[in-house]
Image (cartoon, coloured by chain):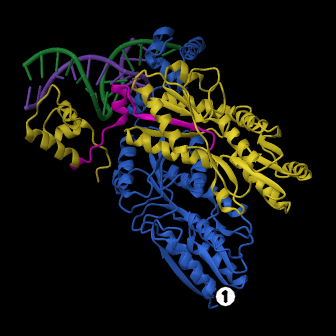
Chain colours: A blue, B yellow, C purple, D green
DNA sequence: TTGTAGGCGTTATCAA
DNA sequence: TTGATAACGCCTACAA
């Protein structure tokens, strides 16, 4: 039971060659070195026999590369981010990098600690959906490649990959118009650190304004209670041809729940829509019409950007706003 | 713009002390060394000024500890696993460890590569929901602390933390009995590497047998099409007092979808239940009754087990089967 | 109260 | 075709 993991030195000892020989053979580094086939074979054999695995610590120390990148998101539990991470992880893995995942839980303090820690672990790049404007400052001054996703880092030059939120709002507004709604309420929890919500709201208003339909924005407290949706529903019910739009997957979910518990008929009494798709929106009857994000593309682009910065290909990195997608179901 | 990250040596240089002094002061390692307060102060000041962060690579190489553990799951996108990871990450973080996350996508090949990689990164422990029986062999022979979660590693002594699947099935069976069902179909995709599904099925049968209610198990292909649920539904419709139970969150979701598209009334025409909870189960109307897992406890226990093994507190680690939870909604 | 030296595993440069 | 050596950043026994 050899519990000790073998180093390059032990492999060398057993194969009767110098450690550096082992290193070059195992790394296929034959640029300036030719080795006898039998030496190569022997080294390979011994390495396999001993179950040799290179020590990343040793390698990192020597090369300065860790082949690790980080991703910092508010919540892995959300449909959007879990799918995003899944796609991202795939791309990261395929390029030989590994992904260190951190969930800030929208907590700025923790976010800073996470970042500090990631930096000391020598990550070569970071993809972040920031909960705080300041927490990434350390990454920027350290000169570590950084890409923001979902939420931009306003006031910085950090390249961003995200949904075109204004277009998303407009698309929804347009659709509401087509469906003949005359009153619209946009609902979202107060999220001081998320600049995307106001943009979605703005887009919605813009879309509706084309036919002079008025919109009302409702800002709920950050951790609002289900009961707080009741007055919104009551208000909406009093008007004819009203739709409520959740600006967040969770909000939309709960609006629908509230309408249900009020025994309202959707969409006849009140229409419901949302920005961001989620499985329940499809299962529920009537299904909830939503604007979906191109998650796979977001992940792809975000890592492409990061890789560009890591490999120092100083391509111009414009911010990237991806187009939203309308999914028509029956709730509007 | 000092883009280079300072080492302990540079801090020492600037503070006019030896690197080892810096090391001991920064690590509060005063067991055999007393330092003049002004030296301490100076070192601290310089470290902060330079934005010093210890290099994990250097430290790991020297100490053999990485303060990293891994988690390997089939799919971060599933409700169960995303919540599990969230809870796990919290505990891991709080004990000073960091979490390396990997998604195998139920792919045994990839799983092996992941594990190989994690090992070479020097993880001090691994929590795994295995997609394959063999892939963890490497971890075992390397003597790295290992805990399985959700799915046990049969035929090994790896400590396991998971739901009591038989009890979960029984609990559901019991409830179906109470609700007066006379026919039950248990549906799950074929998952050769997931031993929990047969257990759930077994428990269900056991629960139902108490009153002689028969159960039928339906094994769907791994990536079954929605259309394949149609015959199941047709079959179920032909019997009176029938309930279909999904053994997986995804399966339950899709069974419900199928019943919907057939225009069936739930639970009057057919009842639906599931093992594993998910948000949509709550939002749909009627809500889907499910057996829920104690996710937070699972994560807590799993990491507690791992930590025990890492710190070599050779406490006896019995396998841990946590009790399921019945959530009554209206679909049964 | 502080300094010195050695080595963890790796790879790049230089020598043979 | 192979070997020797040094260095990455850190910690720690041992010396001063």
Q: Is residue A116 left or right of residue B252?
A: left
Q: Is residue B19 or residue B2 the one in the foreground?
A: B19
Q: Which residues are magenta?
A: B49-76
Q: Is residue B46 magenta?
A: no
Give the x, y percent position of residue A130. 44, 59
Q: Quadrant of residue B220?
A: top right
Q: Is residue B26 or residue A37 the one in the foreground?
A: B26
Q: Quadrant of residue B269?
A: bottom right
Q: Would you name the residue on which mark 1 appears?
A: A240
Locate the N terminus of chain B and report the quarter of the image it occupies. bottom left
With respect to residue A242, does D2 lie above or below?
Answer: above
Give the x, y percent position of residue A316. 50, 61
Q: Is residue B80 or residue B63 the one in the foreground?
A: B80
Q: Chain of mark 1?
A: A
Q: Is residue B60 magenta?
A: yes
Q: Residue at x 42, y 69 (%)?
A: A192
């Amino acid at each position: 039971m050899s519990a000790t993991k073998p180093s390059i030195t032990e492999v060398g000892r057993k194969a009767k060659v110098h450690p550096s020989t082992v290193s070059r053979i195992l790394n296929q580094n034959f640029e300036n070195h030719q080795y006898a086939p039998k030496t190569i074979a022997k080294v390979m054999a011994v390495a396999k026999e001993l179950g040799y695995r290179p020590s990343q610590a040793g390698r990192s120390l020597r090369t300065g590369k860790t082949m690790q990148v980080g991703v910092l998101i508010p919540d892995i539990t959300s449909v959007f981010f879990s799918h995003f991470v899944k796609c991202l992880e795939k791309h990261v893995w395929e390029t030989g990098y590994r992904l260190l995942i951190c969930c800030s839980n929208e907590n700025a303090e923790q976010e800073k600690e996470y970042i500090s820690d990631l930096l000391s672990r020598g990550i070569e790049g970071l993809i972040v959906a920031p909960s705080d404007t300041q927490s990434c400052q350390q990454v920027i001054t350290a000169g570590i490649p950084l890409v923001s996703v979902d939420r931009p880092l306003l006031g910085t030059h950090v390249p961003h990959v995200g949904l075109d939120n204004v277009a998303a709002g407009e698309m929804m507004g347009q659709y509401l118009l087509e469906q003949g709604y005359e009153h619209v309420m946009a609902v979202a929890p107060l999220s001081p650190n998320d600049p995307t919500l106001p943009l979605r709201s703005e887009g919605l208003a813009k879309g509706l304004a084309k036919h002079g339909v008025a919109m009302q924005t409702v800002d709920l407290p950050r951790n609002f209670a289900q009961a707080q949706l009741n007055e919104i529903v009551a208000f909406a019910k009093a008007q004819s041809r009203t739709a409520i739009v959740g600006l967040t997957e969770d909000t939309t979910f709960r609006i629908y729940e509230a309408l249900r518990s009020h025994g309202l008929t959707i969409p006849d009494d009140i229409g419901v829509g949302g920005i961001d798709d989620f499985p329940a929106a499809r299962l529920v009857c009537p299904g909830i019409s939503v604007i979906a994000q191109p998650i796979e593309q977001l992940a792809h682009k975000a890592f492409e950007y990061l890789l560009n910065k890591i490999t120092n290909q100083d391509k111009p990195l414009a911010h990237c706003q991806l187009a939203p997608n309308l999914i028509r179901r029956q709730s509007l």
